[in-house]
Amino acid sequence: MITQTARKIPSFALAITMLAMASACSSQAVVDDPPRRPAKQSVDYSQTVGAKAASVALRQIGVPYRYGGSTTSGFDCSGLVQFSYARAGKRVPRTTGQLWSATSTVRRADLQVGDLLFFSIEGKMSHVGLYIGGQQFVHAPASGRTVTVAKLTSPFYASALLRAGRPQ
């Protein structure tokens, strides 16, 4: 939630802000920590398809969010997943719902690099990211943002996580 102290926001600015928030991958802007590079890990990204997909996704950091986007000119959350897995040599479905159906459930304790993380935003499953290890994931969060890394342990994502899945 955006809070302001000591100044008022003009109504037109508030309307523009709300419109931008409504056009995200989900129907609400996803809030996470400032964009940053993932922590160094000892993961060999060449071993599995999932690890290769995560490596591809990490190379997209900074690419702008674009609703319906699935190219390096802009991604939405599921477009980033599909693009990354395609570059890693595996075809996966395009939408978040289709991805949910095409994955087998993985317990949080058994997460592997490249597993998909599904989140509930405003009460419905509507966001997906790729696990990169170290309790972090890469995703295309929202309109006006860029592909970034977020912490799975942040209060927002910890409470929004529905399940993890591994493409079959």
Image: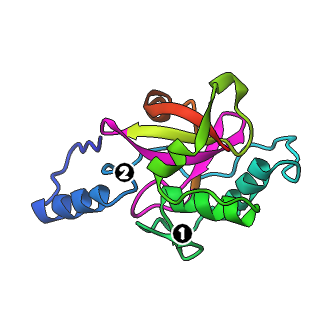
Q: Check residue 70 in the rendering and tell me which mark sits there, or answer none.
A: 1
The way the protein has been coloured in the rendering is rainbow
What is the secondary structure assignment of the residue under circle 2?
Answer: loop
What is the secondary structure assignment of the residue under circle 1?
Answer: strand
- Tell me which residue sits at (40%, 37%) in the image: 120
Percent position of residue 146, x then y: 52, 62
Percent position of residue 73, x then y: 54, 77
Q: Nearer the viewer, residue 166 or 18?
A: 166
> Label 2 sits on what residue type?
Ser
Picture layout, residue 33 above or below residue 8: above
Is residue 140 rendered to the left or right of residue 25? right
- Tell me which residue sits at (64%, 24%) in the image: 107
Percent position of residue 138, x then y: 61, 50
State the residue position of label 2. 26
- Tell me which residue sits at (72%, 55%) in the image: 53
Mark earlier in primary sequence (1, 2): 2
> Label 1 sits on what residue type?
Ser
Q: Give the range drawn in magenta.
A: 121-147
Please identify the residue farthest to the left as the structure is shown: 11
Residue 148, picture quadrant: bottom right
